[in-house]
Image: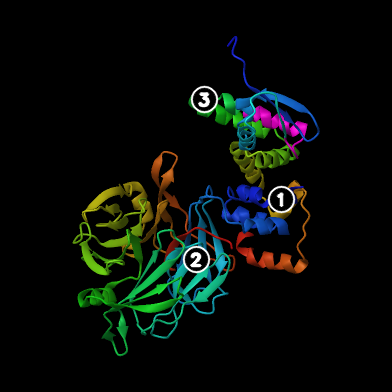
Amino acid sequence: MWNELPGDLLAQVFSYLSPASLARAMSACTHWQACARYPLPASASHPPWFLAVPARGSPHCCYALDPALQRWHCLPLRFIPHPIRLLAPVGAGLILCKLATTACSLRLALCNPFSKQFHLLPSLTKPRSNPAVGLIPSEDSSSFRVFVAGGTSGACCDEPTLEVYDSRDRDWRSAGAMPVEFAVRLTVWTPNESVHAGGTIYWMTSARAYSVVGFDVERGSWREVRAPMADRLEWAALVQTRDAGRIGLVGGACEGEACVWELTDGDEWALVGEVPAELGRRFWNRKGSWGATRCVGSDKALYLFRDLGSEVLVWREGKRGWEWVLVQGCCGDGEALIPKHNIPIRAVLLPPVLT
Amino acid sequence: MVGVKKKMVTLVSSDGVEFVVEKRVAEQSLFIKNALNEGGVEEKVMIPIPKVTSDTLSSVLEYCEKHASATEFQENEIEEWDKEYIEKADLDLLYYLLQASYSMSIMGLMELGAKKVASLIRGKSPQEIRELFNIKNDFTPEQEEEIRREMQWNYE
């Protein structure tokens, strides 16, 4: 009986399941497995998972936090032939990453650790090391473009040009020159994390005083926006925000303190949130630990994190509006216990897609 | 109201039982609403509801009756009512309600049923799901092994 339920109906049922429950339901029989691969109805909107990959060495696992159950899962990365570093979520379960090989030139790839997909993108048109990488989806999210800007080529010559990968063409093409002053700043400073809003990709310079560099992909124009409290911020990170048309900046000026700003139309920063003092004290529980703070965000939540074993500070929409909560760090990967505190991570927010 | 005659329609279940209900109740089903519009008939309409038995149809109509008479000010009350309504359905009825809501196009009922089934699946292992819903495991041993490997992250 139940194994004959029409696919549309089952897909409707499945749309209310968390990815973990769905994965178990689709293991029940072949019909359910086939239906779980139907495109989900629009009503399905699970909060994205927090996916962390160690930022050094050759990680054999990545770690995914299911925000609904506050549970960590360990996802093996052995299906990927190279060590990787996270760059940005692409959508549909895919993440953009770069290979951490000994070759100098940047090489990008897409992977889905839930369904074990991996494909290498073609080589860049020009070999570059340490360029800025930014990702921007098309308006209907059906395709995306990756922009690679600046970097050095050959014997440390600056490469003040841009190139772009379009997922529809599946190849790179040159996108012309870029102002040298931006090429230099991006090359030297960029921590390779980009956010996008309103057709512009933004990067943060990685040294104080912080500032934000934006590239308007349609006009091909560059601009710089000073960070709020720029000369006082000890750490800062760019994030996608609750309002998809804007970017956010998270940063702190002294220990145990952090604020969230949004960039408004007139390039002004509006303060939208603040870490409650008590939670801040618990999150930054070691002296000087705020220096290693990183941050990722989406329209549904904002995650502040430091390393794998440490707690994660989450700002999310709860029953009574937006609330800050501390979530336990990852404490084991099934094979070995994780040494507390000392595995630095990069992370993205990713809706887990199993297909 | 005295003197105002309510428009009625007759629904016939797959096992031949006739249900006479108000038009506005029956129209909770988009399938019936479309059928009435196309027919253009005012009175004494008989609409066969294929594949839905009288047991199921009577439960479906209970849902339609409630939702046709609820006003927008009673949101909390109707939510409570929905909860009790779907809670008292056993697994077989739940299955037939889902099928009926699908074939009769009653979106609210379909959503309610689907949510209920999802809540039964939640937190269960594949084997527990098979037992509850009486589903035969039709994977080959090789397929099963592959799933086990793929889903390892989920079996901690």
Q: Nearer the viewer, mark 1 or mark 3?
A: 3
Q: What is the CA distance from the residue labelled 3 to the residue labelled 2?
A: 44 Å
Do we see residue A216 in this rendering? yes
Looking at numbered disc 1 in the image, what kind of residue is underneath it?
Answer: Ile
Residue B56 is one of the magenta-drawn residues: yes
Q: What is the CA distance from the residue labelled 1 to the residue labelled 3?
A: 38 Å
Quarter assignment of residue A89: bottom left
Give how far across and how far down residue A218 sits, in percent.
Answer: 30, 66
Task: Note whether B75 is above or below A78 in the view shown.
Answer: above
Give how far across and how far down residue B51 sits, in percent.
Answer: 75, 40
Q: Nearer the viewer, mark 1 or mark 2?
A: 2
Chain bearing mark 2: A
Q: What is the CA distance from the residue labelled 1 to the residue labelled 2?
A: 29 Å
Neighbour class for label 2 at 10 Å: few (<14), some, many (≥20)? many
Q: Mark on residue B71?
A: 3
* Residue at the disc numbered 1: B129
Instruction: Identify which residue is drawn at 40% across, 74% down.
Output: A165
For marks 1 and 3 on the same chain, the one whose residue lies earlier in the sequence: 3
* Residue at the disc numbered 2: A94
Task: Note whether A187 is above or below A31 in the view shown.
Answer: below
Q: Which residues are magenta?
A: B49-64
Chain bearing mark 3: B
Do we see residue A293 in this rendering? no
Quarter assignment of residue B65: top right
Indicate the secondary structure of the residue bearing disc 2. Answer: strand
Circle 1/circle 3 CB separation < 8 Å:
no
